Image: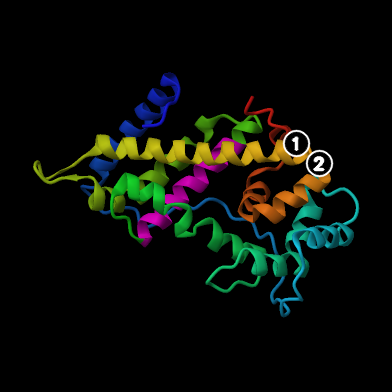
Amino acid sequence: MRFFQCERFFNRLQVCLFLAISLFLACQSSPDPSVLEPERENIDPEDSIEPIASQATPEETFEQLKSENPGNILDENFKTLRRLVASKTYLDFLRRNHPLEDQYQTFDGFWEIAASHPSRYLPFLKEQLGNPDEEDVADAHLLAAYHRHVITREYHGEDRDLFQDAWTKLIRDLGVNIMFKHFVDDKRNALNGAHFAFFIVEIMLYVEEIERTDAARAPELLAKHSEQDALIWIALENPVLIGYILKDFTDVQVFLKWMRGEFHQ
């Protein structure tokens, strides 16, 4: 298991053990069929996309996006950035440089596919579960996306406890399938709640590791570019991250602190 601070680990483990016990008891009755998903904002209003334009380098695309979106890209509620990712120029760039096997018409459509793509979770899930399937990937993504949302809201000064009920419900709803497929003790013919609790902790650690990696890249770009230009380069390099930024950050000043690495010093 990865190295981490003992206090934070045992706090997480205590919560997850409680959830595992609650889930075990809940399994005696029919599971709640509704699954709480992270709130998804409609970033892109476009209904159709024109054919992809001729090839352009990332540098040329950067200049074009900058000219199409003059002014402050870090304006209130990221209005300019939302317009940028909805543009034909940006969507054409995604199709050329971040191709997906599935079709999409909007940035929201791209993000839904790319953020939950099996390639983002399978290495981790194979290590944790052995033989994960598509449903495991989908469930892991919902857990990961919500935990990342909570991390970002903490940056805004919100208390993690405010999200505990929703987090508990999400684990209960998704945990039924995961536990019965991967956490049954065959010798005792019983569910192994402790192992499931450790699995939830590992998901949280995995998300936090990715979030730290994302946060570390921003100061590197700031060393070469202005804040405005660095944000466009993040959009070109890591469109999934831009989606998380638009969905989870609501205060531009908090985002700038994150971008400067102030939450990971």
Identify which residue, 67 or 79, lies in the foreground.
67
Q: Earlier in the sequence, mark 2 or mark 1?
A: 2
Using the rendered view, name the quadrant where residue 134 is placed.
bottom left
| Mark identifier at residue 227 | 2
Q: Residue 246 vs residue 69: left or right? A: left
Q: Is residue 60 above or below residue 218?
A: below
Helix or strand or loop: what does disc 2 sit on? helix
Look at the numbered disc 1 and give the secondary structure of its residue.
helix
Question: Can residue 198 be seen here?
Answer: yes
Q: Which residues are magenta?
A: 134-152
Report the mark closest to the observer, 2 or 1. 2
Query: Quarter of the image containing the N terminus?
Result: top left
Q: Quadrant of residue 3?
A: top left
**View extreme (top): residue:** 7
For the point 44% across and 52% down, which residue is it? 121
Report crowding for label 2: few under 14, some 14 to 19, many 20 or more residues within 10 A (C-alpha). some
Measure how far apart labels 2 and 1 are at the Cα level: 8 Å
Q: What's the residue at 75%, 60% (across, down)?
A: 58
Q: Specify the label residue 256 is tagged with.
A: 1
User: Residue 172, position in %: x, y?
Assistant: 35, 45
Question: Residue 6 appears at what percent x and percent y?
Answer: 41, 20
For the image shown, how many numbered marks are present on the structure?
2
Q: Main secondary structure of the magenta part?
A: helix
